[in-house]
Amino acid sequence: MGYKHLKFPENTLFLVTGAAGFIGSNLCEAILELGYKVRALDDLSTGKQANVDLFLDNPNYEFIKGDIKDLDTCINACDGVDFVLNQAAWGSVPRSLEMPLFYSLNNIQGTLNMLEAARQCGVKKFVYASSSSVYGDEPNLPKTEGREGNLLSPYALTKRCDEEWAKLYTMHYGLDTYGMRYFNVFGRRQDPDGAYAAVIPKFLKMLLHGETPTINGDGKQSRDFTYIDNVIEANLKSCLAPHEAAGEAYNIAYGGREYLIDIYYGLTKALGVDIEPNFGPDRKGDIKHSNADISKAKRLLGYDPDYSFADGIKLAIEWYKENL
């Protein structure tokens, strides 16, 4: 069913943090298209100004340049807000291994600041980005909430801490929180550049420019790649979810499983190029296989993802062809 039929009261105001990022900017766009108001917050440390500028002409959009590590900024941003969609965080497992102190400050203390600001301002629902990385070395597939292993990176630890703080804010402070355990989200506006870029946009950009991508490991690792519109649906449906579903974290994925090497050759075929990849070492802190059980999100949030990997990758290829 997607999200385009969802209804909120007139003049509903959403706060999207991390709004200049990939997921955040797509959430802003979707909410504005539905006719509701967006207040966007981002410090532009990893997001792009271009993603903010897309919406500046829309009277229902306002942008605040600010940092979630500052509590006063968070409180000001939450003033008068109905729903918070907290996407502000630094991603990347390898980078977190290099910068553990910063990740703790930004991803844990920053999220805690947002929770406290939302509580003080009487926000109705607090939806936040978690990650499939919280499953750590738990070997069983599909990944099921409540069955987590040992954490493998500072990034994963920050997301697990966010979930525990959110649970406490529901338990003790009456703030309905909903954690989105994203599984390898991809789609329009995902950044292909930089050492820590996600694999699909990175492959697409290099192949479109006739360059040779490097696959970390043997390419036989698998992931539950999830198209961005499924993620938008999950966030917005969480804002309409009952109190009984609050204080929980949910797998947000399609429920499929794609091997990296198959994706690579699928992209070369779709683009009509014949480039063999290089193979590099495995990335530290990475898991070998990932695949989500999404039955809990279906049952408690009404999540019913429209876009399979095949549907999403076609749309992503079209977008990158036009925009790279």
Image (cartoon, rainbow, N blue to C red):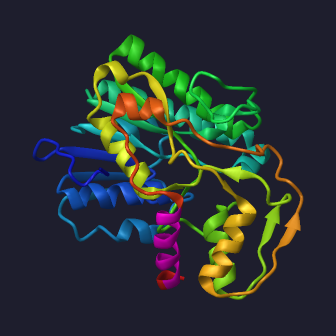
Q: How many numbered marks appear? A: 0
Q: Is residue 86 above or below residue 299?
A: below
- Residue at far right of view: 281
Q: Quadrant of the C terminus?
A: bottom right
Write the residue at 78% across / 45% down: 288
Write the residue at 28% across / 68% down: 56
**Residue 313 painted magenta:** yes
Specify the segment rendered in magenta: 310-321
Front-most of residues 305 and 69:
305
Query: Does the image show residue 226?
Result: yes
Q: Position of residue 213 (x, y in %)?
A: 77, 74
Query: Does the image show residue 78?
Result: no
**Residue 59 painted magenta:** no
Write the residue at 47% across / 32% down: 295
Residue 20 relative to residue 78: left or right? right
- Residue at far left of view: 10
Majority secondary structure of magenta residues = helix
Q: Is residue 189 above or below residue 20?
A: below
Residue 93 relative to residue 85: left or right? right
Q: Position of residue 128 (x, y in %)?
A: 45, 37
Q: Position of residue 2 (x, y in %)?
A: 32, 51
Q: Position of residue 193 (x, y in %)?
A: 64, 71
Q: Is residue 287 above or below residue 111?
A: below
Write the residue at 53% across / 67% down: 313
- Residue at far top of view: 172
Image quarter for residue 155? top right
Residue 121 relative to residue 199: left or right? left
Front-most of residues 271 and 174:
271
